[in-house]
Image (tube, grey):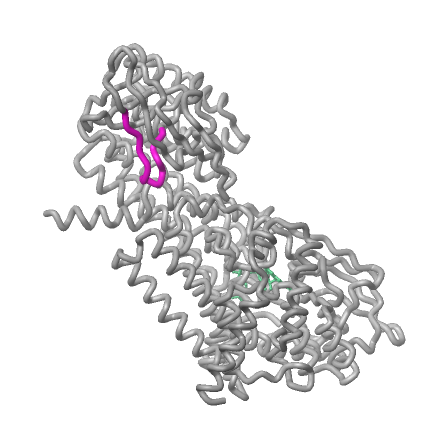
Amino acid sequence: MPADLSEFHDELRASASGLLAQGADWAAIAGAGWPGLEVPAAFDGADGTFAEVAVVLREIGRAAAPGPYPSVAALAIGTLDLLHPGPVRDGLLRAAVAGTAVPVVAIDAEGTEAFRLTGASGPDGARLHGSAGFVLDAPAADRVLVPALEPDGTAVVVDVDPAELTVGDRPVLDATRSLGRVAADGAAVRPESVHRFRVPDAPRRLRDRAAVAVACDSLGIAEAMLDATVAHTSVRHQFGRPVGSFQAVKHACADMLVQVTVARELVDAAVRAQADGGPDAAAASAMAKSYACTAAVEVAGKAMQLHGGMGYTWESGVHVYLKRAALNRSLFGTPAQHRARLAGRRARR
Amino acid sequence: MTGAALDDFRAGVRDWCREHVPKDWRPAQTGVPDEEFVAFQKEWFQELRRAGFAVPHWPREWGGGMPVPEQAVLYEELAAHDAPRLVLAFVSIHHAASTLLAAGTDAQRRRHLPAILDGEIWVQGFSEPDAGSDLAALRASARREGDTYVVNGQKCWASGAAHADWCLLLARTDPDAPKRRGISYFLMDMRTPGIDVRPTRQATGESHFCEIFLDDVAVPAANRIGAENAGWRVAQETLGAERGMTMLELAERLGGGFRRLVELCGRTGALDDPLTADRLAALEIELTGLRALCAKLVAADRPGPADASIVKLFYSELLQRITDLGTEAAGLAAHTDLRKPLSSGWESGAWPLDFLASWEWTIPGGTSEIQRTIIGERGLGLPREPREG
Ligand SMILES: Cc1cc2nc3c(=O)[nH]c(=O)nc-3n(C[C@H](O)[C@H](O)[C@H](O)COP(=O)(O)OP(=O)(O)OC[C@H]3O[C@@H](n4cnc5c(N)ncnc54)[C@H](O)[C@@H]3O)c2cc1C
């Protein structure tokens, strides 16, 4: 990374963590320009890359912050960027950058359900069928971008008003997250709402992007838990010494740091690959997702352990991170599924 | 007992379970108010008592006396029939009973053991804000005044204190003695004036453990267990003894948790995945080892110096691995299971909640780190860690 960019990332990181510490709401986040970090200036964006988005995603994980930023910035804007330009798409992109629209992509985070279009796109338009069991931030969406297959198997994105769909809230243990079930039961689709991708393999690219975004969040979680644990074990005294001076505790913290350090490398590589769109992007994303999301659960669990009884209380907040880390691990592909993808790639060669 | 007789015993327990284990207690108990949970637990305890199943590990003269192989079968069947666990009576039938049996006077045993069978609930008041792993640093004080001790201080993390009738209390009776030699062990009536119990909300959202504030609480000298200033030894002995006995049941219950995990993987098709099958087999091996170890430990006259710690460490971390895999295998749907039944302890089947609750076993009763130190020092005779006091 060039020095000036890394300096810029440090500044962005500092301002993001400052704003998030104040409990920034959507208006503040949009005001800070975060939704448009990656978007070309022609659409009122900051002309950056996914690398800048990743900086914010990591800070959001570090703060275990609620809100739809991950789904808007990582998924919706990523989706819009993969579509052919046009007045409708461009308008939505601008609105998303400005924060006046909260578009959400109806990708099932568990990857099992899907949508399809039926009927020719004649005067009556096509109809949308299908569902997605777990859609990140669906309850907050004012526009839903539904990835669907046309009758001939072409992948498209249908821009739908949530009123045309059934969007059901699905409360989860991780109270910092909002998930919903999205279902379409023959919703009428106007021809101008059906968008085609401008690149091949777009649906897979989107899933990779989603996986990397979650890996960034998990990296932030792991970093936060390591920091909190080092801080706590440095001041908590037992047997007349800070508990961090006991080798058992010190070694556990050291293992956490090792995991965080390795996760950071894998996540950074995956983020770079996303930004460049290189051929290794898929493998890098699978590695980052699998490792960082597993590590975050282990690090948050260790944090709970090393905080002792305090860590098991509601007020300590460690549980907030452990729940979020466990949810992240199941979002957009389990570690085992991502490892299977990697193994499969080798088998084919 | 011969194999055939044991089979008969199993058949009897099975019949009993079919008839008596409450149906649908999980949904019925999920999210109920505390009073309902307490009433349900007490009723279930009496049901088990009538069958002779409530305290099988106690000596015969006090209402127990079941041989270890039968105990293993009993717990196996209770787990297999998904019977509620006696979470409310946990401290009474294990910690309190073993303390009374090991160090109590006849009068204390006669007063409390039958009362426990009648439903008396106990809490363990050991830990304090500044005395967790370093329990001997406790500061709650008991000042002798004639026939009573006047107790002041603060306890924390006391599980179930909100519903307890009696408390196992450690307090300092000699502030000038070395840390471990100035502590005494008391039985404290929770209805004594000056006791204030405040629930603490825990990671799972429930408030099972509590703070106990003690302000000039009068405890009769007759309620001291063991000699004055000898409380540390009593506490050590009973903690060690207690671990072995509770573990037999917990290991069998974990078998139930493992079965649920296998069912889950069967439902999701994960059983066909060789890597999942391998992980499950590895867990099954560990579980089998744990159960064998527990049965042996409970049967042994004299457990080895680190046996209790080995079992506690292995059990609690195995529990963590099983619930962790369950969380991963159950996927996002498991995260929508928000309220576990109060009475279930960890094995509710709501995997992420059970995973979270698995820290209820690696932290209390001596953390995993402390257990490893004990195993190294007492089990292997390695040099002791430098520590103060
Ligand atoms: C769910 C729950 C229920 C509980 N129920 C009860 C109860 O009913 N009654 C009761 O009296 N107490 C109870 N406790 C308290 C429990 O026993 C203590 O939390 C435990 O002993 C740890 O003490 P601590 O919380 O002060 O942690 P600390 O002692 O502050 O430990 C913090 C970390 O430092 C580590 N550490 C500390 N000292 C050392 C050392 N020498 N070497 C290596 N590592 C070390 C610990 O392992 C831990 O990881 C309960 C706790 C929990 C979480």
Coordinates of residue A348 in the picture (x, y in percent):
12, 47
Span highlighted in magenta in the image:
A106-117
Image check: A47 left or right of B338? Answer: left
Residue B55 position in % (x across, y down): 63, 76
Q: Is residue A110 magenta?
A: yes
User: The N terminus of chain A appears in which quarter of the rendering?
Assistant: top left
Report how many numbered discs are placed on residues in the image: 0
Q: Which residue is drawn at 46% across and 45% down?
A: B335
Q: State yes or no: residue A11 in magenta.
A: no
Point out residue B251 in the picture as x, y percentages from the top left corner. 48, 71
Q: In which quarter of the image is residue A327?
A: top left
Q: Reply above or below: B334 against B256.
A: above
Q: Is residue B110 above or below residue A20?
A: below
Q: In which quarter of the image is ligand 1?
A: bottom right
Q: Tell me where residue B138 appears, x and y as whole percent.
A: 68, 66
- The residue under the point 76% across, 57% down is B213
Q: Judge from the rendering whether residue A80 lies leftward or rightward of residue B20; answer left or right.
A: left
